[in-house]
Image (cartoon, rainbow, N blue to C red):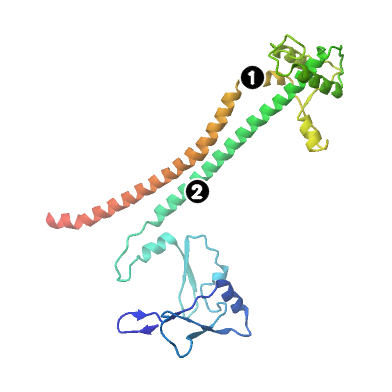
Amino acid sequence: FAMDVIGSVDLCELHVSCMNVVQWARDTANPVKRFAMVPIDKTYELSTPPWIALEFGFPYYDHRHLEGFHNDGNTVRTATWAGDGTEPWRDTDMATFKHQYALVDTGGNAIQEPLEEDMAFIQKMRLSVYHSVRCTSCLIVVVVVVILFLRLYSGSCYTHYYVLTQSLRGATGRNTTPPVATAMLEATQAYCDQNFGGMALDPGTHPCRPSFEQVNYTCTHLPETQRKPSAFVDLTSKGFYGIVEPLQCVPNVCTYFHYMAAWDRTLFLSCFVLFFVNVFCLRPCANQAVEVCRKRLVNQRNAGLRRRAMLPTQTTQS
């Protein structure tokens, strides 16, 4: 800088990377570096490039011992060059430090700033809202996943009982006695799909179109020799090559499927509404509540400052 009578004029500047500074500080063999600086006024012709010599190193005489100071953002560490060496540093919380040392501008005039207590309260409120929204989102996701899994599980089991009912009632024209082989069940399903697929047959009028009561009877009165159906057989056999065992169907699963199938549209709309409310309503409303609380605190502090500013005038007038 070239110092004038009043103020200063920038002559040149230097920008150094932080990573380079750390690397040069470890270079004990050549600690001093002389850097070429960039002139501010590019039109001025210089006889020699401006430069500055700097020595980099790690702090050895810092009484604050910052290398062992793990700050949480709410503590200020100060130190003085005490001759006796007693109490080399002092840790002060942010609120106490701001009360002891007022914030002023370059002219020494006090500047209003938010109280640290209010900022801590708002921060705690933000964290509470954040964790509450996260927990609510996780709960909604778990509920949706559980509902979807139960719907798919019961539907898979009902499909197996449905095909088993077709086979036991002689859908292919042959009398079938339990136990029914898996190949026979697949052949029965293919036969009914090929010959009766797309036909508007009333349930219970043909063995390929059994009614719910007939399927539910097979579900509740499964022959002892017949193996109990399982869910997600195709997924476990083709996707995991039989390594993972399919889930066994629980008793009365056909009744559960009948109840859930009747509420398919309602369940889908409920899941969509929960997702929509969580993404587009819950989060914005929570953030808006925090912002409203912050503005209310600011208005309360400003009102208190105005009342204190008016007290001396009222006393003088009285």
Residue 250 shows in this picture: no
| Disc 1 residue type (three-letter) | Tyr
Looking at the image, residue 253 lies above or below residue 125? above
Return the residue at label 1.
259
**Cα distance in 3D space between marks 2 and 1:** 41 Å
Q: Residue at x 43, y 50 (%)?
A: 122
* x and y percentages locating residue 208 in the rendered image: 76, 14
Q: Is residue 41 left or right of residue 308?
A: right
Extreme residue in the left direction: 318
Amino acid type of the residue that numbered disc 2 sits on in the rendered structure:
Leu
- Residue neighbourhood size for the residue with mark 2, other residues' Cα within 10 Å, grouped as few (<14), some (14–19), many (≥20): few
* Residue 243 percent coordinates (x, y): 83, 37
**Who's the residue at 64% across and 34% down the image?**
145
**Residue 127 has which mark?**
2
Q: The N terminus lies in which quarter of the figure?
A: bottom left
| Among the 4 quarters of the image, the one containing residue 306 | bottom left
Image position of 72 (left or right of 238): left
- The answer, for residue 166, to whether it is visible in the render is yes
